Image (spheres, helix red, strand yellow):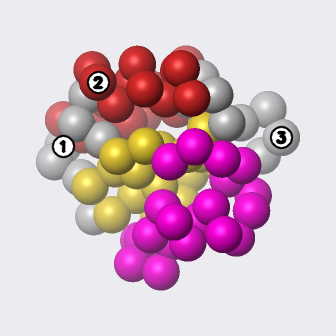
Amino acid sequence: MKIIIVGCGKVGTTLAEQLNNEHHDITIIDKNTAVLSAITERIDVMGVVGNGAVYKVQMEAGIQETDLLIATTNSD
């Protein structure tokens, strides 16, 4: 399953790790480049820098082929 997770906080990171362990195709969107880089280096996920509420960023993340979008930010 192709999944986009918006937000690299504790919840988003934990979800990304678990879903990656279950062999799903994960893309994470976050505004913080440093946090996003740390996560993509540690687990096998794709990262996109930007605001997950912006359509252009969602398109860059592959929203058109995505099965599930999970928002884990403070402003879900």
- SS under mark 1: loop
The image quadrant of residue 43 is top left
- SS under mark 2: helix
- Magenta-highlighted residues: 48-67
Q: CA distance from mark 2 to mark 1?
A: 18 Å
Q: Nearer the viewer, residue 16 or 64?
A: 64
Tell me the residue that label 3 is attached to.
75
The image quadrant of residue 69 is bottom right
Farthest right residue? Answer: 75
- SS under mark 3: loop
Does 31 sit above or below residue 58?
Answer: above
Viewer can see residue 11: no
Give percent across and percent down for residue 60. Answer: 51, 66
The image quadrant of residue 1 is bottom left
Farthest bottom residue? Answer: 64
- For the point 66% across and 47% down, which residue is it? 50
Residue 44 located within the stretch drawn in magenta: no
Tell me the residue that label 2 is attached to.
41
Give percent across and percent down for residue 54. Answer: 74, 62
Give percent across and percent down for residue 30. Answer: 61, 38
**Which disc is residue 44 wearing?**
none
Comparing labels 2 and 3, the label whose residue is closer to the camera? 2
Give percent across and percent down for residue 37. Answer: 43, 26
Tell me the residue that label 1 is attached to.
22
- For the point 75% across and 58% down, which residue is it? 53
